[in-house]
Amino acid sequence: MPWIVGALSVGLLTAGAVAPYVGRAIGETGGRPVLAAAAILLAAGQFTLGIAPNLPVFVFGWIVLGAGMAAGLYDAAFSTLGRLYGGAARSAITMLTLWGGFASTVCWPLSAYLVAHLGWRGTCFVYAAIQLLISLPLMLTILPRVPPELPTLTTGTSGAASNLLPAERRAFQLLSGIVVIGGAIGAIVGVHLLTLLQGQGNGLAAAVALGALVGPAQVGGRVIEMAGGGRHHPLWTMRAALGLIALGLGLMALDVGPIGLAIILYGAGNGVFSIAKGTLPLAQFGPQRYAAAIGRLARPSLIAQAIAPTAGALLLDRIGSGPMFGALLSLALLNVVLVAGLWLDRRNWPHATGP
């Protein structure tokens, strides 16, 4: 069983290895061939899982899925929207994350139904068919064959999309740290929240009910961000997201106030964080280098997400629920410090529009 669960980590590590190349490819092609290839890879990976006769083939299926995830999930979609809409991509990114928030709402019960009636292998085949019959045609028909021309890079800006000016390196390092830590927190909470809540004295039914608040809270946070109409700079969005995450985890760590409120605050912050990590690089590095920047940011984040659940499980087993919430709070507060540094550094961004 540990190796089966570990196959997901192998997939995420594969996604992290592939992500920078995906970003560069989207910057050059506009995203249509990359997202179409993602649908094929995801279908092939699901099919491989469905027919896997042994563990090595099962793990290989996750490697294929990892390549598909790098080419077809949020980071690739954000890069494509940035390539297609340039500086005006923020509203499209927000809308994408809003609809993406319903993925678990739809797919968890659908998966449970399919597994009950078709088994897990049959469920893999169904999802493979969905990729080929729905996702692939949508990518090929909706996305333009030839992406629009982007404005020429301004004077003093690096001509290579993958390079950074000295003034940009500090900002990129700060943002990379924020994305890595935020991804690690999200991965640990996503996997271990029920165990953490039970460790604080909640029964299983209560923990499940409380954990179910995260999804709606994420969507609610994104709705509020969308209602703002992009009036605030993405750096404000990032500050709000990290503040809400820290506040929610702080209430859980101190075990004060209604635990449901703490989870709602955390979930709302996590939902807005998904938007901020897609829109802030656009403001920092401009549309010309956005896809490459997203690809470079995705690699360490995906690696952190692959490692964090296992590391979190080991730590939780050693120190227990309360101290674990304290450790998560420490990471969240570190992110607040990093975003403060990003705020102070904002005037050095060549593309910044000034929050």
Image: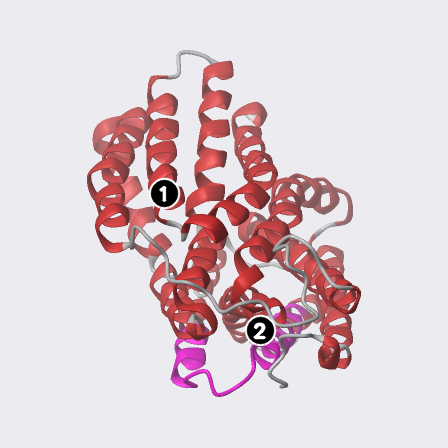
**Which residue is pictured at 23% across the width and 49% down the height?**
138
Above or below residue 78? Residue 113 is above
Q: Residue 342's quadrant in the figure?
A: bottom right
Q: Specify the quadrant of the image occupied by residue 220.
A: bottom left
Instruction: Give the x, y percent position of residue 291.
Output: 53, 56
Magenta range: 220-249
| Amino acid found under the numbered disc labelled 1 | Pro
Q: Is-magenta flag for residue 222?
A: yes
Secondary structure category for the residue under label 1:
helix
SS of the residue under disc 2: helix
User: Is residue 117 positioned above or below 355 on the image?
Assistant: above
Q: Marks 2 and 1: in contact by CB < 8 Å? A: no
Q: Is residue 39 visible?
A: yes
Find residue 96 and report its horizontal and vertical position in percent.
37, 64
Q: Which mark is residue 283?
A: 2
Q: Compared to 112, does 294 lie above or below?
A: below
Disc 1 to disc 2, C-alpha distance: 26 Å
Question: How far across and how far down the image is residue 343, in percent?
Answer: 72, 79
- Circle 2: residue type: Ala
Q: Please identify the residue farthest to the top as the structure is shown.
A: 53
Q: Earlier in the sequence, mark 1 or mark 2?
A: 1
Picture disc at residue 33? 1
Residue at the (65%, 68%) spot, across then down: 249
161 relative to 334 in the view: left or right: left
Name the residue located 77 percent from the left edge and 72 percent from the top edge. 337
Q: Is residue 216 visible?
A: no
Most common secondary structure along the magenta stretch? helix
| Numbered label tally | 2
Classify mark 2: residues with Cα within 10 Å, few (<14), some (14-19) or many (20+).
many
